[in-house]
Image (cartoon, rainbow, N blue to C red):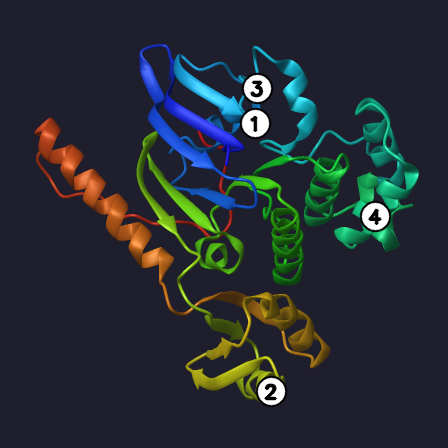
Amino acid sequence: MQAAIETHALTKRYGPRPVVRDLTFAVEPGEVYALIGPNGAGKTTVIRLVSGLAFPSSGTVLMLGHDPHETPTIRRRLGAVVEAPAAFYPYLTGRSNLLLHARLAGGVATSRVREVLDQVELGHAADRKVGVYSLGMRQRLGVAAALLTRPEVLILDEPASGMDPLSLHLVHRVLRDAASSGTAVLLSTHHLDEVVAYCSHVGILEEGVLIDEVDLRDRGARMRAMVDDVQNARLTLAAQPWVREVFVRGRDVVFTLDESAAIDRVGRCLAAAGVALRELGDDSFDLRSYYRERVEAQRARRTSVEGRPGAVAAVSVADAPTGADA
């Protein structure tokens, strides 16, 4: 199978400073690949390079087997939201903005605009001006715009920025649905605890270097939910036929899903029971701890090679973005 996205020794410099160095990775059709790393690790630069919005200093990028710069028409098969939600006119409605995007994309049926609005659950707000949308709603509208043409490749830079937990799970479901139809999804994110719930692969970046890749597909189906009412959540989940082994651990409810697809139902059934879901993640694999270990080890090796004395700085990852990466 041909990779939908493929890079080989990809490097980007701004002046003498390398922001991305010798990056090689691939995303196959049907995969959801997340780039994670500290602010300044180079995630947004990688997204821009792969999207064809920036030129590499050296190395190659292939999208569906083509260089996006040498074959610009290949971008018609791409849907993307890079650095910020798509440019929307605040004085137009969400529907009107998408109709404009549809015309610019070469003509998309009006029915498809309705479909993507419903997919991101903005149908009720379709005729409101975008100027009154919250940041999370604008993010969801950006995802809807990226989905308009049923792209074969979907690239999103921090799609979860400004979203509440239920909106997060909605976008996760949309990305999984896109992947299940064969779309290759590449995204950057800071939401490490959420990644294991909907991504198939993770690449860890540190100072522009891909220091590790993790295949999450065989990590198990035991989940951990942080909620405001653990007993109500426990009883609610225990009553579901697709949930087993439910127990409370501190402020979390831990449970096992009989089928991976059932994760889509967790947020909805808790919300119906009046339970506020704060966080949902995989309990079998602690990506946050693994991430810290790998980044700290990389920094320790770099300190040793460069001969700088002193301790390695501790790694921290914000649960919400704090700015664009280099």
Quadrant of residue 239 within the rendered picture: bottom right
Quadrant of residue 75 within the rendered picture: top right
Q: Which mark is residue 9?
A: none
For label 4, the SS is helix
Looking at the rendered structure, the kind of residue marked 3 is Leu
Q: Residue at x 60, y 70 (%)?
A: 262
Q: Between tags 2 and 3, which lies in front?
A: 3
Q: Earlier in the sequence, mark 2 or mark 1?
A: 1
Residue marked by disc 2: 232
Inspect this view and state whether residue 314 appears: no
Q: Between tags 2 and 1, which lies in front?
A: 1
Q: Nearer the viewer, residue 73 or 129?
A: 73
Q: Earlier in the sequence, mark 2 or mark 4?
A: 4
Residue marked by disc 4: 115
Q: Residue at x 29, y 48 (%)?
A: 315
Q: Earlier in the sequence, mark 4 or mark 1?
A: 1
Q: Earlier in the sequence, mark 4 or mark 3?
A: 3
Graded by Cα atoms within 10 Å as few (under 14), some (14 to 19) or many (20 or more), the crowding at tag 3 reads some
Q: Earlier in the sequence, mark 2 or mark 3?
A: 3
Q: Residue at x 48, y 38 (%)?
A: 27
Q: Are marks 2 and 4 in contact (CB under 8 Å)?
A: no
